[in-house]
Amino acid sequence: MIQVNERISIPEDELTFTASRSGGPGGQHVNKVSSKITLWFDLANSPSLSPSDKELIASRLGSRIDKDGILRVTSQTTRSQFSNRELATNRFIELLRDVLRQLQKRKKTGVSKGAKLRRLEEKKQRGLLKSRRSERVTDED
């Protein structure tokens, strides 16, 4: 069982892993082994998630989900298939935790009275400066 948060746990048999050839460093060895791991999770048909959770995940992770409702997470960081499998699983858990975390409601705040007064005073000072600039200077010598 993979524990996502206190109310959601996903059985490991709902996850599918595939291995393929990875890019990056490795010399001649990189062309012989399949160390890149792709984790597939059938979001649309998962019995572990509620419909509201599925909808939330689909809306926030839309770029990672294909048209059949399958979530894809890849890892090719290391040369070890086992390590990449662990990394992909951890990334999957973190993605779900981030998506399913309740966002705090934003409190509406107003401009303080002091800030309003400072702004108006600044406007008055600026207007006074501009009006003084345009006053006619008479030359009575």
Image (tube, rainbow, N blue to C red):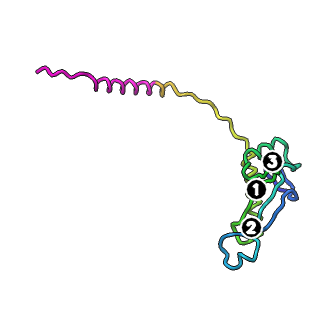
Of tags 1 and 2, the one toward the viewer is 2
Q: Residue furthest bottom?
A: 28
Q: CA distance from mark 3 to mark 1?
A: 16 Å
Give x and y (percent) for residue 97.
74, 49
Asked whether 134 or 109 is in front, the reply is 134
Choose the circle earlier in sequence order: 3 or 1.
3
**Residue to which mark 2 is pinned:** 36
In the orientation shown, which residue stands out farthest toward the front?
67
| Residue at the extreme left of the image, as rendered | 141
Badge nearest the viewer, 3 or 1:
1
> What kind of element bears circle 1?
helix
Residue beneath label 1, please? 92
Which range is magenta? 117-141
Q: Circle 2 — which element?
A: strand
Residue under label 3, please give it: 6
Reply above or below: 80 against 110: below
**Mark 1 neighbour density, 10 Å: few (under 14) some (14–19) many (20 or more):** some
Q: Name which of mark 3 and mark 2 comes first in the sequence.
A: 3
Residue in the image at 31% along x and 23% along y:
131
Q: Amino acid at mark 2?
A: Lys
Where residue 38 appears, as percent x and y from the top left, is 77, 62
